[in-house]
Amino acid sequence: MKARLRGQKTRYHHGDLRQALLDAAMTLIDIRGRDALTLREAARRAGVSEAAPYRHFANLDELLGAVALEGFEMLIGDLETAGRARAVRAAYLAFAVDFPGRYQLMFGPLVDRKALAQRKDEVAHVVELTEDAGGFAALHGAASLNLVGLGAFAA
C-alpha cells in the first residue's frame, strides 16, 4: 500500500463531483440547449476547475450520455409513480415540457457507446410503462409536437 503524500486529499473537496457536473449540465441543457454545453461550462457552473470534469467523464460525449441516462431515470420514476394511464400520459408530456433540452437529448443522437447501449434498455422500459397510456409512439409524438409549438395537433 502506497503511503499518502503529505497534503494529499483522500476525498474530493466538492463532495459528489459527478452529480454536481450532471446537475450543472442538465440545467444548462434545459435552459440553453445541447449545443450550449461544454465541459468547461459544466465545470464553471459546478464551481470546479476546468480539469475537474475529466475525473468522471473522458469527453463531452460521455457527459451528454450520462445526462441522457439521468433523464431516463427521472422520466421512468415519474411514470412509475403516476400509476393510472391518464396520469402516465400527463407525466410523460409534463416531463417533456419541463425539461425540453434534456428530453430532446434523451431521444436524439448520442455518440457515447455505453450510453447508447443502456438507452435501448431505458426506452424499452418507457415503452412498457406507457403501453396503457396510448403507447410510447403516440406520447413521444405528442410531446415532440408540443415542444415545437404544434401541441394543438397532438390532441
Image (cartoon, grey):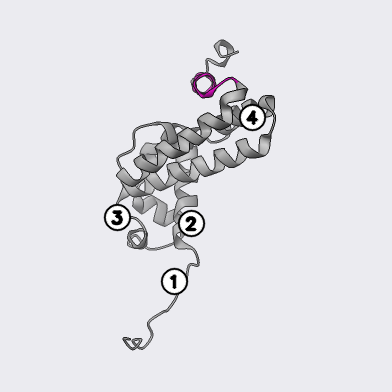
- In three-dimensional space, the C-alpha distance between marks 1 and 3, rounded to whole angstroms, equals 18 Å
Residue at the location (49% across, 63% down)? 16
Q: Residue at x 55, y 22 (%)?
A: 135
The CA distance from mark 4 to mark 1 is 39 Å
Height in image: 77 above or below 151?
below
The crowd level at tag 2 (other Cα within 10 Å; few <14, some 14-19, many 20+) is some
**Residue 75 appears at what percent x and percent y?**
55, 38
In the figure, 64 relative to 13: above or below? above
Q: Could you tell me residue 35's position as x and y percent?
A: 36, 37
* Helix, strand or loop under label 2: helix
Q: Are marks 4 and 2 in contact (CB under 8 Å)?
A: no
Q: Label 4 sits on what residue type?
A: Val
Looking at the image, which is closer to me, 145 or 139?
A: 139
Instruction: Give the magenta-colored segment's residue range.
Output: 134-147
- Mark 4 or 3: in front is 4
Q: SS class of the residue under badge 4?
A: helix
- The residue that mark 4 highlights is 88
Query: Which is nearer the N-term, disc 4 or disc 1?
Result: 1
| Mark 2 lies on residue | 19
Disc 4 to disc 3, C-alpha distance: 36 Å
